[in-house]
Image (cartoon, rainbow, N blue to C red):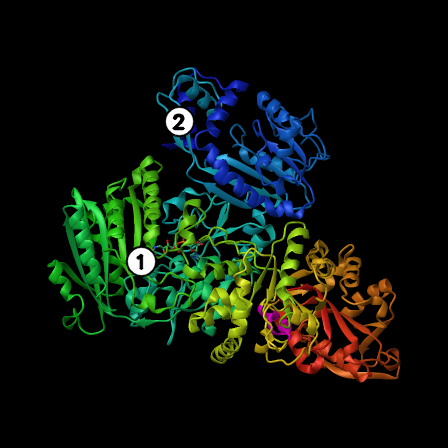
Amino acid sequence: MTTLDSLERTLRQQVEATTSSAKQPLSDAQYSAGFGILGGGSGGRTYQDFIIPQLSQLLAPLFDSCGSISALEIGPGATSILGHLPNHLRRKVRRYTAFEPNSLFATRLGESFSSPSKAELLLPCLETPPNIHPISFTLQGDTTSGIGTGDNDEKFDLILFCHSMYGMKPKTKFIERALAMLDEQNLAMAVVIHRDSIYLDGLVCHQTASFPTGVVRVADDDESLGCFATFIAGFTLEDRSLDKAVQTNSPEVMMAFTKHATALSELTAKVPLEKGNPTVKNWEARLHRPISVVRPTEVRHVQQCVRWALVHKVGLTVVGGGHSGHCLMSNVVAINMGAFDQVHILAVEQEGTDSRPDGDIVSKTMAAGVTVPLGARPSVGAGLWLQGGIGHQARLHGLACDAIVGAVLVSVKSGEVLYVGIVPSQHRPTDAVCPENEDDLMWAIKGAGSNFGIVISVTFKALPDPTYLVEERVFPLSDSLEAQLTLSNLDSVFTKLSRNCSADAYLYWDAGQLQLGVTTFEASMTPLASARSATKYIDGFWGDCRRKVVNSVGLFETDLYLSGMHGGHARGKTFAFKRCLFLKHIGDENVAGRLLAAVQSRPTPLCYLHLLHGGEAVSDVAREETAFGCRDWEFACVITGVWSRDQDDTEAAQAAMRWVYHVAEDLLPVSSGAYGADLGPDPRDAALARNAFGPNRPRLARLKHSLDPRNVLAYACPLPKAPTEPKLIILVTGKSGTGKDYCASVWVSIFNEHAHKSLTARAVSISDKIKREYAAAKDADLKRLLEDRCYKEKHRPALTRFYLDQMHQRPQLREEHFLDVVHSSVNVDVLFITGMRDEAPVAAFSHLVPDRRLLEVHVQASKTTRRARRECPSGDDDVGEDSMSTRPALDYCPHLIFDNEAIGTETARRFAEQYLLPFVHMDLQRLATMVRSVPGFPRPGIEFRHVLAIVQQPGGLALCSSLLHTHFSSDWAKVGAIVSCEAGGFVFASPLALRVSVPLVLIREAGKLPPPTVSVSTPRSHISTWTFNNPKEKQIEMEHCVVREGMSLVVVDDVLATGRTLCAILHLLRKAEVSVDDVSVMVVAEFPVHRGRELLRERGFGGVRIQSLLVFGGT
Ligand SMILES: Cc1cc2nc3c(=O)[nH]c(=O)nc-3n(C[C@H](O)[C@H](O)[C@H](O)COP(=O)(O)OP(=O)(O)OC[C@H]3O[C@@H](n4cnc5c(N)ncnc54)[C@H](O)[C@@H]3O)c2cc1C
């Protein structure tokens, strides 16, 4: 099989060699025949499996950001591609234009819109009839329609080159033309779908994806071959130039370009460029054509790259040792980290840098008498130790990532320089800051490090450097039975080896038969004559061997594939493609059988399986301790597809790759995971990536979402999209028998019915978790405990004792249970939690979910009602779930209180409509988008949320006051005054006071109001103490006479963070003889991470009702 590109080249050469063919425009019939061939074969599957899902994902942010979309399709054929998108996206398309040069297709396309039944299925919300031009899209524009001819052109949100850009030359000019026709104001984009790889000179792509398994087949008849040649090469073949059916590999490529596509010069003006192309090792990466390769020499260059990528919303690739296929991607900027190549050995630590090959680090450390466990090959770079690092020292010293104790990296969220863990001060850049989430970042770097930042340097813990006795044996295996038996023997012997011994196996075909190569490595700190305690009994099984003694550098040269296999790996004249899975028992019939079948089915003679030994130090580290979550394996099986270099771009190379994926697919069910290194955006890697990080995938997904929110590192090992966890969490509390679960179920149905039908709500009971643990420990019937009220009542005292006992043993139990319930509620937007046993749960838990809104609705009912509702009265009304609580009665103010006296759902429904649904109203989201985030202000590492920026947006202040007005959960008519403190409070309180016709009480810094005043001292806000050299405290005061006892007051402020300002205001009001029972608070934005509610409660203001419009996770 060839590629379409090479086929086109061949055809052209052929035509140029014969004068019989003239370049001429295609007839409609030729065009449709060629088009049909291109779209046929695997084409249908490509659309279903790749184009439509990828396009839907790509377009979602654009479509979400616009009320309506104006789309232009270029060459859609007889049907619109957009018409295949999911319904919610299709409904957004309000204007549709197409250029379809084939008149037959253009007619059919028009008909598809004019038939009412079909049109409804295509783009149902078009505001104007579709505008279909039966002509080509040209660089000059269409003079008949006027489209693309002048400054007054219609602008589009989306321009789609639907089915390849054949015939459009130069392609770059056509994209530039499309970019000029894009709307300036939004995320407008031009998307190219093209058969075969495509490089567009000078244009940076916003996103790219490829579906590499596409194939185009042309039937072996004159007509088909002629049509196809004509279509692809753009001319008519007079002779029969193709004498057999054509089958070409034809990956489908999708590339999106935005108006930022031409921004490359902004970067290249600031950052040094690589001279020539970097010599990456990986053959696949060599096929990709990055738009530019930069070679930063200073940390600030890396920062400039990241900031440029963030501004222009594009991804980057990073080149370490260049061994992975995705360190270069076509039309994407690559950062070659080759200049960061120093190794420093320090008294207690050693530091390697990100691109220095393993061999250099090892030789330097060895000279100092220590070592770092790196991989088995000397030339591999930072990608290895950031993503794992399996080598011959793994059993003794662990993985390379286990030895990481610190790192310096550039954040791909903000461009700041961060350091985590131990970084010796002399190697810490002066502007490096330690981020708040240091533990998370450190955890993620150890095993998934290519996804979370651009790593500048790594500090490794050094370990004693032993000497190694290496023994090499090769066993020819005559048949499958012998092979199976030998693998089984090998397995049982290998598992007995002590920690300082490790054994690798190779399964390959040579000299006409299956071969098993075994290399054992015995590490020793003592002279080797007295070593061989552990491997000696291998002799009992397998007799003689080649033996040598090596140091840590010599260890790199001991791989059998270098020394013995296939005459020394075909003397380096090969390319290889690898994927790696983890196996436990290679001697198991089921595993061994698959391994042997794999070698037997090798498509080229050089393909082999390499089994690297694990266990011991690798599995000593708990799965959750580092991001590298696959720890439970004895062998890492590297499936290695090899072909000779002269077979590149041929069927042999393709077949070797297919074999690797096929074997990986076959082994996956018997494996205990896959190795994340080498996995990239290729959709064939998706199944392996799903098995890459063991139980750590959900945490990694969440971290990717927070540490690389713009997906700057878009081409690293794929992580799942962060599961959408609930944005609104409502704790339904109340005494036993008040009907909490019932209310929660009614409210769930209201959300599911009402909120634009786009939200999912669910209710869960947090006490189910403890009931499960109780049932398991005490042999109780879990089903009855969950469902049978009388049974539950019977067990309640014992359950309570069990709970308190667990609390005693695990003081964090409540937090653990709470987070467990939240994290396991994936793809739920609104979560109701019942069964809470905690007092003031919002104050206690909101910092654990700082970017979600946590509300408490307290359900209450009279004693009689509660008793009547109980199916199994326990006698004492207050013994219920509350009996596990430490609080005697409610001593704080929940957000909302619901009186559940009435029978039926009506009152509960009305309550939800009035008080709960407003929390998911679009207006709140609109207000949230007006709060600008400013990274690095007022100091590095802080992301400042500029709440006052709301008033700088058109309509911002009006929207905010309207929301403060409507969200207030009491009656404005009963409010005597709005109290506010300068300056943020004044801004939002004034228009609100005007709106609700309530007087305003002003609190100012001391000395600015006429006497008589009352005053208190207050600490400055945490932001202003960082910003200026302000004294830590200030006095605030108010006029005494403006409030009076018994007056109902609402304090309005811009922000609730630490709660100290609010405490001071409440103190002041108390001093002015206002009872805090008469005060409630409304703030525009709350930052739960600072635990302001907790402080207020501690200071005696737990009874004050506090409402906030917005909730933010940062500062
Ligand atoms: C011949 C060969 C031998 C191998 N031997 C071993 C082995 O013995 N043990 C083992 O565990 N693995 C081995 N591997 C797999 C190897 O670990 C991966 O291919 C690894 O990704 C290579 O890292 P690299 O830096 O050389 O490659 P690159 O392609 O440059 O980088 C790989 C990934 O890491 C990212 N990356 C690189 N540098 C940085 C940085 N500074 N900051 C952030 N991200 C970065 C890249 O963006 C890319 O996603 C081998 C691979 C090959 C081809």
Residue 1081 magenta: no
Residue 1043: tell me if it is visible: yes
Where, quadrant-wise, is the C terminus in this rendering? bottom right
Q: Which mark is residue 10?
A: 2
Q: Do the residues labelled 1 and 2 touch (CB within 8 Å)?
A: no
Above or below 944: residue 221: above
| Image coordinates for residue 5, horizontal then vertical, percent | 43, 32
Q: Which of the pair 64/205 is nearer the observer?
A: 64
Residue 982 occupies quadrant: bottom right
The residue labelled by disc 1 is 378
Q: Ligand 1 lies in which image quarter?
A: bottom left
Q: Magenta residues?
A: 840-848
Where, quadrant-wise, is the N terminus in this rendering? top left
User: Label 1 amino acid?
Assistant: Pro
User: Label 2 amino acid?
Assistant: Thr
Distance in Å between CA atoms under marks 1 and 2: 40 Å
Q: Which of the pair 306/880 is nearer the observer?
A: 880
